[in-house]
Image: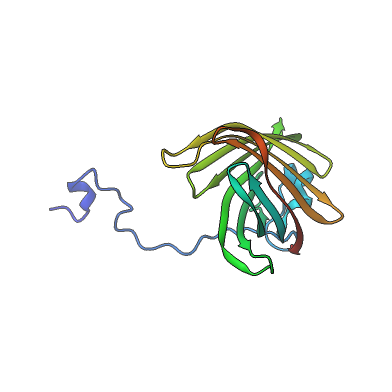
Amino acid sequence: MSANPSDENPLQPPWLNAPPVDEYPYEESHDLRVGPKLHPTLDGLLPYVGVWRGRGRGGFPTIEDFDFAQEIRISHDGRPFLFYESRAWILDDQSRPVRPAGREVGWWRPVLSGDRATDELEALMMSPTGIMELYIGKRTGTQIEFATDAVVRTSTAKEVTAGARLFGIVEGALLYAQEMAGMGHALSPHLSARLIRVAG
């Protein structure tokens, strides 16, 4: 009998009984003063890195308008993409939290020509409601304009067929407007907000 279980069962991977590993060893940061150095292809997106918090207004032809608060974290780990995470919550007419609202995670990547970034961007955005959106965009100064190239939905997700997003850094604040098409309606205003930097 062999002392090595994988000799007896070649389908048993060698890592099956390996010792535990330490925590993830690479740092991710939303603060350019600490952590890894920003990848040079992200220099044009540098103003977006940070934690942003603020208020917005939402609506769509199929729902009533609503007020919300939101926190967006845009960070990096030294590689040529940004990590995007958003959490929002509904506010009542006295600005009190009512309930959690939309959540998203995603990645923004500059399109490269050789090893240099162009003004074109790709973004992948995903929500826990079963919707994944692939955006193609362009950066002009501190403004980014995205439009969907593809929308993928689970069988239980709402019918969303297209989207457009406009981001901008205006007087130090992060402003955005989002349009959505779906549920029998053409591209229509959906969300807009102004967020201020709270970290980074």
Give me the residue at 75% from left, 51% from top.
48
Which residue is the extreme one toward the left? 1
Residue 169 appears at what percent x and percent y? Answer: 81, 50
**Which image quadrant for residue 60?**
top right
44 or 153: nearer the viewer: 153
Horizontal side of 185 relative to 165 (left or right) equals left
Can residue 33 be seen?
A: no
Figure coloring? rainbow
Residue 32 appears at what percent x and percent y? Answer: 74, 59
Can residue 75 be seen?
A: yes
Check the picture and name the quadrant holding the C terminus: bottom right
Seen in the picture, residue 152 relative to 126 is either above or below; the reply is: above
In this rendering, the count of numbered labels is 0
Seen in the picture, residue 154 relative to 30 is either above or below; the reply is: above
64 or 106: nearer the viewer: 64
Residue 30 appears at what percent x and percent y? Answer: 69, 59
Residue 70 appears at what percent x and percent y? Answer: 66, 59
Horizontal side of 155 relative to 109 (left or right) equals left
Give me the residue at 62% from left, 50% from top.
64
**Which image quadrant for residue 99?**
bottom right
185 or 28: nearer the viewer: 185
Give me the residue at 57% from left, 38% from top.
133
Give me the residue at 66% from left, 50% from top.
58
